[in-house]
Image (cartoon, rainbow, N blue to C red):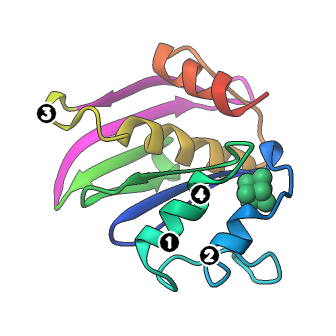
């Protein structure tokens, strides 16, 4: 299972398939990472520094974290796409089709001036989440999305 969690400053990526249950995250920030709660990751209950440090100790890279840079990433499942916004300005998109019965990502792009902030990864990750919620497999013809899929789906 793949999920993203966000607060105003951070985006946390969670890949349950990589988790070795070493609980470094729980020990590092018990108010943030609590397997007894739903969702088990609750940002905003501890300082960002504490969360970041806890994630940096994850031995399996099941957890990773980037800055949010004020960019909102939102699914538009009706139109088979995920969009990134800076305020009300669209600055990126990840598009897929479901023609073959599975999700197939064919296009991912982020405006040149916004590159290097992890936005494309956030877009692809959200589409992976959506495919999982719809119990569909996911592939990609888009080379960037292919790379992310190889990295997160083993
Ligand atoms: S630190 Fe990483 S491997 Fe350990 S429980 Fe947390 S997510 Fe899983």
3D distance between C-alphas at marks 2 and 4: 9 Å
Secondary structure of the residue carrying tag 4 is helix
Q: Position of residue 55 (x, y in %)?
A: 59, 57
Labelled pair 1, 4 in contact (Cβ < 8 Å): no
Classed neighbour count for the residue bearing mark 3: other residues with Cα under 10 Å, few (<14), some (14–19), many (≥20)? few
Secondary structure of the residue carrying tag 1 is helix
**Between disc 1 and disc 2, whose residue precedes?**
2
Q: Position of residue 139 (x, y in %)?
A: 67, 23
The residue beneath circle 4 is: 55
Classed neighbour count for the residue bearing mark 4: other residues with Cα under 10 Å, few (<14), some (14–19), many (≥20)? many
The residue beneath circle 3 is: 113
3D distance between C-alphas at marks 3 and 4: 28 Å
The residue beneath circle 2 is: 29
Magenta region: which residues? 88-110
Labelled pair 1, 2 in contact (Cβ < 8 Å): yes
Secondary structure of the residue carrying tag 3 is helix
The picture quadrant where one finds residue 88 is bottom left
In the image, the residue with mark 4 has its CB under 8 Å from the nearest atom of ligand 1: yes
């Amino acid at each position: 299972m793949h999920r993203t969690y966000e607060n105003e400053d951070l985006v946390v990526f969670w890949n349950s398939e990589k988790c070795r249950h070493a609980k470094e995250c729980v020990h590092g920030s018990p108010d943030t990472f609590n397997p007894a709660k739903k969702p088990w990751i609750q940002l905003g209950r501890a300082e960002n520094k504490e969360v970041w440090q806890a994630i940096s100790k994850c031995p399996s890279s099941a957890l990773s974290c980037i800055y949010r840079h004020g960019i909102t990433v939102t699914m538009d499942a009706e139109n088979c796409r995920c969009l990134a916004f800076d305020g009300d300005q669209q600055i990126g998109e990840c598009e897929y089709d479901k023609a073959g019965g599975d999700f197939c990502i064919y296009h991912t792009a982020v405006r040149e001036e916004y590159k290097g902030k992890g936005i494309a990864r956030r877009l692809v990750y959200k589409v992976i989440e959506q495919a999982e919620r719809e119990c569909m497999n996911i592939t990609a013809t888009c080379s960037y999305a292919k790379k992310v899929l190889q990295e997160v789906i083993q």
